[in-house]
Protein backbone atom coordinates (compact mmCIF):
# COMPACT_ATOMS: atom_id res chain seq x y z
CA UNK A 1 0.00 0.00 0.00
CA UNK A 2 1.18 3.50 -0.75
CA UNK A 3 1.90 6.16 1.81
CA UNK A 4 0.39 9.62 1.70
CA UNK A 5 -1.39 12.41 3.49
CA UNK A 6 -5.09 13.26 3.52
CA UNK A 7 -5.71 16.97 4.12
CA UNK A 8 -9.08 18.46 5.02
CA UNK A 9 -9.22 22.21 4.37
CA UNK A 10 -12.05 24.53 5.35
CA UNK A 11 -14.28 25.30 8.28
CA UNK A 12 -17.51 23.37 8.70
CA UNK A 13 -19.57 22.72 11.76
CA UNK A 14 -20.04 19.05 10.89
CA UNK A 15 -17.99 16.78 8.67
CA UNK A 16 -19.61 13.72 7.21
CA UNK A 17 -18.27 11.11 4.88
CA UNK A 18 -16.45 7.83 4.83
CA UNK A 19 -12.82 7.13 5.55
CA UNK A 20 -11.40 3.67 5.17
CA UNK A 21 -9.67 2.64 8.38
CA UNK A 22 -7.20 0.48 6.46
CA UNK A 23 -5.64 3.66 5.01
CA UNK A 24 -4.53 4.69 8.50
CA UNK A 25 -3.16 1.25 9.23
CA UNK A 26 -1.07 1.43 6.06
CA UNK A 27 0.74 4.61 7.06
CA UNK A 28 -1.45 7.43 5.80
CA UNK A 29 -1.67 10.67 7.77
CA UNK A 30 -4.75 12.84 8.30
CA UNK A 31 -4.29 16.59 8.73
CA UNK A 32 -6.82 19.38 8.93
CA UNK A 33 -6.95 23.13 8.73
CA UNK A 34 -9.76 25.46 9.70
CA UNK A 35 -8.31 28.28 7.65
CA UNK A 36 -5.22 28.83 5.58
CA UNK A 37 -2.80 31.66 5.21
CA UNK A 38 -3.49 32.29 1.53
CA UNK A 39 -4.56 35.70 0.25
CA UNK A 40 -6.08 35.04 -3.18
CA UNK A 41 -5.48 38.59 -4.44
CA UNK A 42 -1.71 38.33 -4.03
CA UNK A 43 -0.84 34.67 -3.51
CA UNK A 44 -2.74 33.18 -6.45
CA UNK A 45 -0.30 34.65 -8.96
CA UNK A 46 2.64 33.22 -6.99
CA UNK A 47 1.02 29.78 -6.95
CA UNK A 48 0.38 29.91 -10.72
CA UNK A 49 4.00 30.93 -11.35
CA UNK A 50 5.26 28.03 -9.23
CA UNK A 51 3.02 25.63 -11.18
CA UNK A 52 4.31 26.96 -14.51
CA UNK A 53 7.92 26.65 -13.29
CA UNK A 54 7.15 23.11 -12.02
CA UNK A 55 8.16 24.04 -8.49
CA UNK A 56 4.98 22.48 -7.12
Image (cartoon, rainbow, N blue to C red):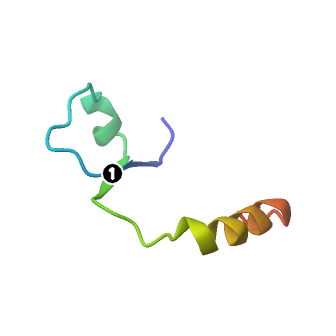
Which residue shows up at 74% across the image and 62% down it?
48
| Coordinates of residue 38 in the picture (x, y in percent) | 49, 69
Circle count: 1
Q: Is residue 55 left or right of residue 7?
A: right
Residue farthest along the front direction in this orientation: 41
Residue farthest along the right direction in this orientation: 53
**In the rendered view, would you say 24 is above or below 19?**
below
**In the rendered view, would you say 26 is above or below 38?**
above
Q: Which one is in front, 45 or 9? A: 45
Residue farthest along the left direction in this orientation: 13
Q: Residues within 10 Å of mark 1 (few under 14, many from 20)?
A: few
Residue 32: name its quadrant: bottom left
Which residue shows up at 81% across the image and 62% down it?
54
Q: Mark 1: which secondary structure?
A: loop
Which residue shows up at 76% across the image and 60% down it?
51
Q: Which one is in front, 51 or 13? A: 13
Quadrant of the frame with the C terminus: bottom right
Q: Which one is in front, 39 or 17? A: 39
Q: Is residue 49 left or right of residue 27?
A: right
Which residue shows up at 64% across the image and 65% down it?
44
| Coordinates of residue 7 in the picture (x, y in percent) | 39, 50
Q: What residue sits right under mark 1 in the picture?
A: 10
Q: Is residue 39 left or right of residue 54?
A: left
Q: Which one is in front, 37 or 23? A: 37
| Coordinates of residue 36 in the picture (x, y in percent) | 39, 66
**In the rendered view, would you say 23 is above or below 49?**
above
Amino acid sequence: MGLGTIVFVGARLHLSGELKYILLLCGRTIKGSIYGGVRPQTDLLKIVEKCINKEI
